[in-house]
Amino acid sequence: MGLYSRIEKLWWSQHTPPLLLRIIEPVYSFISDKHLQQRAKKQIQPPLPVISVGNITAGGSGKTPFVLWLAKALQQQGYKPVILCRGDGGSNSIPQFVDPDQPASLVGDEARMLADLSGLPVITASDRIAGCMLAAERGNIIIFDDGFQYRHLQRVCDIVLVPAEGTGNGHRIPAGPLREPVKALDRADLIVRTGLMDAVKQSNLLSNKHEWGWFSQPDGLIDAMGSSSDLPEHVYAATAIARPGRFFESLESFGLNITGKRSFPDHHQFTRQEVDQLLAQQNVVVTAKDAVKLIDLWPKERPLWLLKLKGDGEPGLLETILKHLPKA
């Protein structure tokens, strides 16, 4: 098991973190809190209304599929959403719209996937303020992916996603997965618990606010290479996402037999050697976020199985979000 997997397992267990991490934890928390307070004092009014979709834990809360669902739902309500991403995993440093021919290694894996699956304008920008200014060219509302801690930008709606499993061991980075203390949920307009339906319904409340449910479930396998291969029953699972265990659980809930597993750090760029190692396995299955990075390295004659997910909010969630927005 790699270092990344060990840390992820530690964060989401109930075991006491190692002493060294617990010593570093308050130092990191003090620096992080000061930084967030400074951001909040210098807020900027963007040219378009901003909906922030963020979290208080490091990765693995389902932000990307939720953003896709929200963007399409707003489009159906008459809005023209523009999705704003930081561009994690990409080398680009200039705010720009994601073009169809740009690889994930340049614009970032999540930005590439959001552009491919949404069909909407997607901006990748490490400078999110500059990205917001660019958004006014093509839309009338911004969906800000991973924006809860980026308090420079004023927003009309702050949505915080919390996985059904909660906040892991309850410690802050690096001893646990928390970016901020749980009391930071008081800043949120909506708290949304995410995951498989049964897990969400059984989750323990973290606040005094109403906690909405947004449920995701597997929706079949497709071959990202477009072959006519028969659907497999046995698969080798590989992924480079935060909390890969959720991906493996989704495969199992879909009734697939997993012959082997391999996880990489979030936003990992696959090397030629790693792709060759995956090709030595039969019926490799990945997430959509992985596929946008692998497809250019994968032989056209070999299927690359992709697990599709579909998600939806509980009744009333979308209507509650719309109450915070100006009319389309």
Image (cartoon, rainbow, N blue to C red):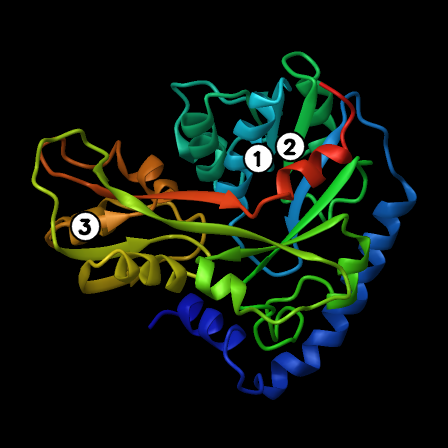
Tell me: residue 52, above or below residue 216.
above
Q: Is residue 152 left or right of residue 171?
A: right
Can you see residue 90? no
Tell me: residue 315, above or below residue 184.
above
Q: Secondary structure at mark 3?
A: strand
Density class for disc 3 (Cα within 10 Å; few <14, some 14-19, many ≥20) is: many
Can you see residue 39? yes
Foreground of the two, 293 or 61: 61
The residue labelled by disc 3 is 284
Q: Which mark is residue 70?
A: 1
Q: Is residue 87 left or right of residue 113?
A: right
Q: Residue at x 56, y 29 (%)?
A: 73
Foreground of the two, 320 or 103: 320
Check disc 2 and give the amino acid type. Answer: Ile
Check disc 3 and give the amino acid type. Answer: Val
Density class for disc 2 (Cα within 10 Å; few <14, some 14-19, many ≥20) is: many
Q: Residue at x 81, y 53 (%)?
A: 187
Q: Position of residue 56 (x, y in %)?
A: 67, 59
Check disc 1 and give the amino acid type. Answer: Leu
Density class for disc 1 (Cα within 10 Å; few <14, some 14-19, many ≥20) is: many
Q: Is residue 26 left or right of residue 219?
A: right
